[in-house]
Structure formats: C-alpha cells, structure tokens
Image (cartoon, grey):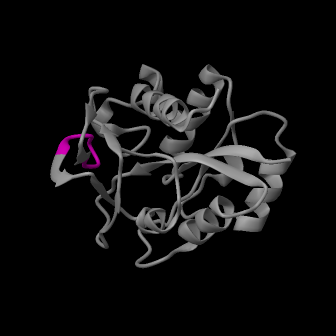
Amino acid sequence: MVKHVILITDGDKYARQAVELTADKLGCRCISRSSGNPTPLTGPQLVEFIQETPYDPILVMFDDCGFNGEGPGEKALEFVATHEDVQPLGAIAVASNSSFHEWSRVDVSIDQFGHLSEYGVDKDGVPDLELGRVAGDTVYVLDRLNLPVIVGVGDIGKVGGFDRPEKGAPVTMEAVKLVMERSGYH
C-alpha cells in the first residue's frame, strides 16, 4: 500500500520534539526513530517503518549533521522519496548555519512569526535576501526530486525561540499544514 509522507530535513532532539507534537495535534504519525544527528536509519529501514505505520500521513525526519555533500540524511531521504510504495506530499526544508552551505529552491517560506514569504529564511526564521531558496545542510537533494511543494522554515523546534514545543511549535505546525494543503492531501 502506498503511504503518504512529509519529508523534514532536520532531526535533532528539538526537531523531534516539535515534529512529534505537530503529528499528535494534527492526527498524523511521526517516525520518531528517524530522528538523530545524523539520521541513524537507512532508506530501506525507513521505508519498512513507513509501511508498518497504520496511519497517514507520516512525518519523517532526515539530518546530515553538517556533512559536506550528500550525507546519510540525504541518501535516506532520496531513497524514501523515490520508493514505489511512498508518495511524498512535499518537504519542509530547514535552514541551518552549517559551515557547508547547500541550498534548495522552496515554493514558499514561513518566517518566525508564521507569515508566508516568497523569500527564503535563515535559521532563526528571518527572511533572507534570496528569493525562493533556503540554505541548509540536508536540502541539496530536494531539487532532484519531483515534490509537489517545498516549504522553507528556520531551525525546527527553535526558530530563534519562536518554535519551541512549549509554545506549541507553531512554525512546524504551519509548515506541515501548508504541505498538506498545497499538495492536495485530504
């Protein structure tokens, strides 16, 4: 059976807390074991967990831990996104301040206040000078994939303090809702 997933390019403990909270509030599922810095599971392992999940859509985290080039998170992300039993609804491209800046195009970004922007955002959710792109360490592979929507956000679970789980992770919540809405998921 084909499962719907939302790909999230962050997996540290703060991201995990925000993504788990978002999944719970929106009635989605999160593969918590996909969190880690870097991603601890391979693409085939993640597809197995996705297929075992009885709910839909499923939020899956990927992280390269600042690895230069295509790291373990991006390898796993590409495998999952192109697997025949997985249908990506879109991706949340997370900005970072890694020393190796890769970037990806985004359809829209969400700033620290939850406003939509045609500009990219930085780690703190502040609009960048670049139109339609976000710099991060696990985003380069996104441009090779045929995804319905890519939403740029600051560092999930943090975003300069605006996305903390204690505050309800509002930026993460809006990003997941936006991916579901713009992908046509019902």
Q: Check residue 125 for magenta coloring.
A: yes
Up the image or down, 52 lies above or below 179; here it is below
List x then y, in percent, for residue 119: 21, 45
Q: Quadrant of the C terminus?
A: top right
What is the residue that sits farthest to the bottom in this orientation? Answer: 69
The answer to whether 172 is drawn above or below residue 89 in the figure is: above
Q: Is residue 105 left or right of residue 172?
A: left
State which region is magenta: 121-127
- In terms of image quadrants, where is residue 138? bottom left
Q: Nearer the viewer, residue 172 or 91?
A: 91
* Residue 184 in picture, x, y percent from top left: 57, 33
Query: As rendered, which of 117 and 61 lies closer to the eye?
Result: 117
When the figure is inspected, residue 108 is found, relative to residue 79, above or below; the finding is above
Q: Nearer the viewer, residue 131 or 134?
A: 131
Q: Main secondary structure of the magenta part?
A: loop
Where 73 falls versus 186 (above or below)? below
Residue 156 sits in quarter? top left
Check residue 173 for magenta coloring.
no
Q: Residue at x 61, y 52 (%)?
A: 35
* Position of residue 51 measured from the top left corner of the image (x, y, whole percent): 83, 49
Identify which residue is drawn at 37% across, 46% down.
155
Residue in the image at 67% along x and 61% along y: 80
Query: Image point 69% across, 36% down: which residue?
Result: 57
